[in-house]
Image: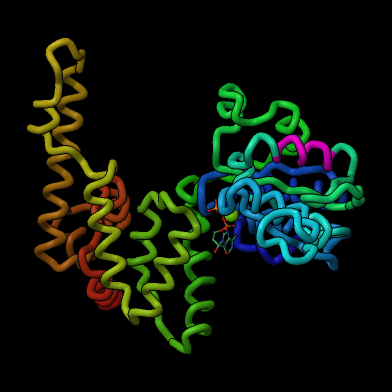
Amino acid sequence: MSDGLNLCTSSKMQPIRDLVGKVASTNTTVLLRGESGVGKEIVGRAIHKASPRANKQFLKVNCAALPGELLESELFGHEKGAFTGAYRQKPGKFEAADGGTLLLDEIGEMPLRLQAKLLHVLQDGEFSRVGGERLIGTDVRLIAATNRDLENAMRQHQFREDLYYRLNVIEIRIPPLRERREEIPVLVEHFRRKFNVQYGRTVEIPAETVRVFMEYHWPGNIRELENAVKRVVVLGSARPVHQEIITSLQRGPRTSVPVAAAAATISPDQVISLKEIARQAAREAERVAIKEVLDRVHWNRAKAARLLQISYKALLYKIVQCGLVTPDPDKAAAKESVAS
Ligand SMILES: Nc1ncnc2c1ncn2[C@@H]1O[C@H](COP(=O)(O)OP(=O)(O)OP(=O)(O)O)[C@@H](O)[C@H]1O
Ligand SMILES: [Mg+2]
């Protein structure tokens, strides 16, 4: 297994690691799917590194970054005089990556005309530069990536069906970070070390902040986590990032709706059992009580557990269940170590 996926040890990522190992030795086209920042490129690179092409080029082209004509020239190159500004001949990425791997990122954004040209290359292994006649042979392993709903794009005639089936020989769907939270501590430690080295720092990240990180839903996935750790290292303190995440968590779906407000949102035709109302009220009452006690003892959870007459473990569970997060990671961590 290549270095890129070493940190992805969750059960959700295991099938992906296995698949990378299986497809690497073949020449099949792979379609990588997943939200932005989940690590599609990392998986693409891992396939290349584990393949017999590993000592040849791995190149990447973002199909959304260039308008049609420029994208065509980027991929296939151009002859001198092919268009205004084409002062000399220039080979494209398909030539440069010969013998290696080419990752076409955001494939869903490729214009239809270019999709036809790409299909042709995939079928025949040859193409001509923009403004040229001569056919050039190429041996490139293609990996495509997208976070777009290609099936829908196909129904709307924005993506060619034949190209879709040609690309989708092996599909790898990478789950979002919120579905593999157990990887967060390892990733945080990896990024912390990396940025400490990069910026010549020795910043630590409090365990409490890592716990908050594990609660957050990370819409920007690993890229967002990486940037959060980078900010902690650059600022030399976890506090601002920690606080921002708490604010977001409090706004987010995990925050309990107050009972009165919940009751007020029940419309006349909505069926809700008395039992359910009682359950919600009990949960909310617990949350308020726990929060009050925790605030009173400055988040010393051992002390709070004693006051609430529940076990320390039960309190930790309830804190997570109620979506409660400490307002000050450094202090809470210090209290905790004094308490234990
Ligand atoms: N397993 C991993 N280990 C270490 N870093 C990772 C891992 N997965 C992703 N990253 C980091 O997270 C960032 C986003 O990863 P990547 O670019 O592969 O995502 P992507 O799915 O291609 O995103 P986009 O859809 O925005 O192009 C990168 O900086 C990458 O280095
Ligand atoms: Mg990418």
Residue 222 image offset from top left, x and y in percent: 50, 58
Taking the spot 70% from the left edge, 26% from the top edge, the residue there is 161
Q: Is residue 121 magenta?
A: yes
Taking the spot 24% from the left edge, 53% from the top edge, the residue there is 324
Q: How many marks?
A: 0
- Indicate whether 143 appears above or below 6: above
Where are the magenta residues, as a range?
Answer: 114-122
- Indicate whether 8 appears above or below 264: below
Q: Main secondary structure of the magenta part?
A: helix
Q: Nearer the viewer, residue 206 or 102?
A: 102
Taking the spot 61% from the left edge, 56% from the top edge, the residue there is 9
The answer to whether residue 260 is visible is yes
Residue 115 image offset from top left, x and y in percent: 71, 37
- Indicate whether 269 appears above or below 96: above
Q: Residue furthest top?
A: 269
Residue 290 image offset from top left, x and y in percent: 16, 52
Q: Nearer the viewer, residue 173 or 280?
A: 173
Left of 117 or right of it: where is 276?
left
The answer to whether residue 93 is visible is no
Taking the spot 12% from the left edge, 13% from the top edge, the residue there is 268
